[in-house]
Amino acid sequence: MVGITSIGGYLPRRRLSRQAIFEAHRWFNGSLAPLAKGTKAMANWDEDAVTMGVEAARTCLSQGDTAVVGSVLLASTALPFVDRQNAGLIKEALYLPDEILTLDVTGSQKSATSALISALRQAEQSTGKVLCIASHLSVDRPASESEISNGDGAAALCVGNERPIARFLGAHSVSVDFVDHYRRTGSDHDYRWESRWVREEGCLKIITDVVGETLGRLDIDPEQVRYLLIPSVVPGISPKIAKKLNVQYEDVTAELQHNAGFLGGAHPLAMFVHCLEQAVPGETIVLVGFGQGCDVLVFETTQEVEQCGRAFGDAIRAGQLTENYLRYLVFRERLDIERGMRAELDQKTALSAHYRDRKAILGLVGGRCRESGIVQFPPNRMSIDVDKPRLDTQEEYRLADIPARVVTCTADHLAYTPDPPYYYGMIEFDGGGRMATEFTDVAEGEIDVGAAVKMMFRIKAVDDRRDFVRYFWKAVSTATN
Amino acid sequence: MASGIKDKVAILGMGCSHFGERWGSDAEDLMIEAFAECLDDAGIAAKEIDAAWLGVAFDAMNIGPSGIPLSTALRLNNVPVTKVENFCATGTEALRGAVYAVASGAADIALALGVEKLKDTGYGGLPARTRGTRFDMLGIAGSAPGNFAQVATAYGAKHRISREQLKQAMAHVSVKSHDNATRNPKAHLRKAIDVDTVMNAPIVAEPLGLFDCCGVSDGAACAIVTTPDIARGLSKKDLVSIKALSLAVSNGWEIQGSGWDGSYFHTTRIAAKRAYEEAGIEKPREELGLLEVHDCFSITELITMEDLFISEEGNASADVLDGFFDADGRIPCQIDGGLKCFGHPIGASGLRMVYENYLQLQGRAGERQRREVPQYALSHNLGGAPNQNVSGVSIIGLLD
């Protein structure tokens, strides 16, 4: 019986005050006032849909069984590459085997639920599991409602047949070109139609019809539905739809919206993860995706749902408040500031060299000498045992999931970084292995000699001249993360 | 069994340009300035030079690659010109080439010249640049202050020295060098400063402040070396000979192994041991009379006192604050102002250090002259970062 076998979610550390956004735009658009409550999760300059997807997936894969991942689906309308497989980047970062199917699913706000349906169908046909990730980096024009409401984040689900936490009862999909909003390839913002029309002709009609049809086909009594998850940025929709369907309604993901925001194409899966963490066994959950049609999936939680933990809920409640809206505009490339000459450093990547070193760069795979047991990063032909260097004795040894401690560090106010100061130093991994590393998401005082850190997948450098993004791993304090 | 180079090579002449922001001079001007003084000091004609070593660390930013720029600037006689680079230890590397050529008998008279024209970069400090294909993908595009600040953090943590105490000791180092440079007409920076100024200066890379960091300069320095016999034949007086010239290069142990605690320079300790052994020095704290070390950052100078086995491990601050290394102290360090104030044209610095030591040994250091002429003068020249670097140590002394 196929279903969800493990879950994970990721939110960036910063929470941008919506009040601060509103204050900046108040002179132009005072009507944003009602939306100025709470915060939005704000990705760091070195995060994007791929990096956040990786982190959600890592959380998801760290629980659950060890069945081989047979395919990776990444759903997002904010992918950094239109043609360079983004799911493939995630596969490298997760150090999954090369024998795998990877798939980017994009083009709509229902990409995540469509991907999930595909994942479930795939898992039904195989013994392995399917990793389904949804991720969003907000792409909104300043002073828009979207900007203040939307947030950045990712969610991931493993789908398989072994002891699911929620079994899949069925799904139904409808596709219609209802364009509540759209974004053209290469554009940096959405265009939206009147929200009253979207609510009346779109959500209230289409979602209600498709949910009703789904419950009918699956022979599920509306009164049996415990949670109805509708990812809608238009306020007040969900209780109305629930009422029309005779389904109870509880805003079980209110905290997610209030603290992190509407996570765009990732929102359906983020809601689902947040809900599962709060659910108890034997509950029926209806998950909706809406965007040029509607997907509806129905699940029932099992005893295993009690193992879910609260990691995503904790992440929603945590976070570092910031009121610096200007930094947000600079990070999202809405404001072109003077970065100084040191920023002119050419970040060209030799793709041939990058391919040779892809495991070290994308997977943080070092080497462990099979004779001495010594771990090193990066892997070299000659092992690091300087008393007896050995040639070609290292086996692949992944460091990404191993905790580490700071050996040396500094906060550099001179070298160029998009988010000064530039924190870097040297760390040593438990069990051996050392590397020079950048630190990211640093709050003052967190990084000092001896501090405990973990590794996260981030953007290393952006090559503006050639439109390329190079990724690598950075260390983050585990004190509050 | 190698027989070493001790006393096989004498310095025939040295020259050094003014260091500083030489807006009106290009690399060729700087080379000629240093070379002219050197040639005059040597008392020979340029065509008597058999081979040359050119040291430039950032050739892409100034004179370009190969040995051609030296040969062209000085119109050498199509002699071999070897271009060398080893980060900030380039100057010592150039000298090594020339000295080893003479010691081996491959050349009678050899030239070593280091030059750096960095003030066309467009901003202060070292130019941001690639460090190699693989490094750029895996390494950190940090700054020199950021790299060296880490050794301060680790040193303070290891020896339980508070940030305040460490900054006080580092401040003394810089104040002392600034004072020394007021007596040096060729120095880049010639203004005295006080400890408060240093302590309150803006932080460049925690915990290093503005006055803990040397700037970069334009400049050139050069040496002509030969055998003691040839030097005597040319009536050179007060011969200064090379006692040792060692170099140690990181092999990855610091940054990939697990034994280094980040608080000292592993290669300096090795280079120092080798140099002392070759020179026959057993008690450096007693036998050395003068030091020019790589004070790219005040913390580097401080820790180097321990890495040269002059101060006890963890005790350099005490020696520093005691004035042990002041101009009137037991072993003056950077009596000419050092990298901090004389300046740091990267490829020339190693040679500039030997220049001052050489002048002091010959009693020609003018206002800076140490009354007690040292028996041995040591230079220490470090290139790279604390976690991977090249460390060169030279020891020179009067021959007779």
Image: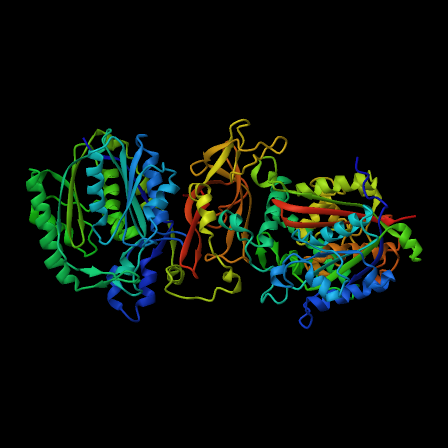
Would you identify the image quadrant in which residue B357 lies?
bottom right
Quick one: B150 or A249, which is closer to the camera? B150
Q: Residue at x 85, y 58 (%)?
A: B369
Would you identify the image quadrant in which residue A96 lies?
top left
Which residue lies most toward the top here? A371
Quick one: A95 or B145, which is closer to the camera? A95
Q: Is residue B201 visible?
A: no
**Residue A424, horizontal then vertical, whole percent:** 52, 48
Would you identify the image quadrant in which residue B17 lies?
bottom right
Q: Is residue B361 visible?
A: yes
Image-based side of B199 in relation to B136, left or right:
right
Q: How is the image coloured?
A: rainbow
Classify A274 as above or below A419. above
**Residue B228, horizontal then vertical, whole percent:** 89, 50
Classify A395 as above or below A32. above
Q: Residue at x 85, y 46 (%)?
A: B8
Classify B7 as above or below B360. above
Image-based side of B288 in relation to A96, left or right:
right
**Residue B110, horizontal then vertical, whole percent:** 80, 55
**Residue B112, horizontal then vertical, whole percent:** 76, 56
Quick one: B63 or A235, which is closer to the camera? B63
Image-based side of A419 in relation to B317, left or right:
left
Q: Quadrant of the N terminus of chain B?
A: top right
Number of on-image labels:
0
Which residue lies most toward the front here? B78
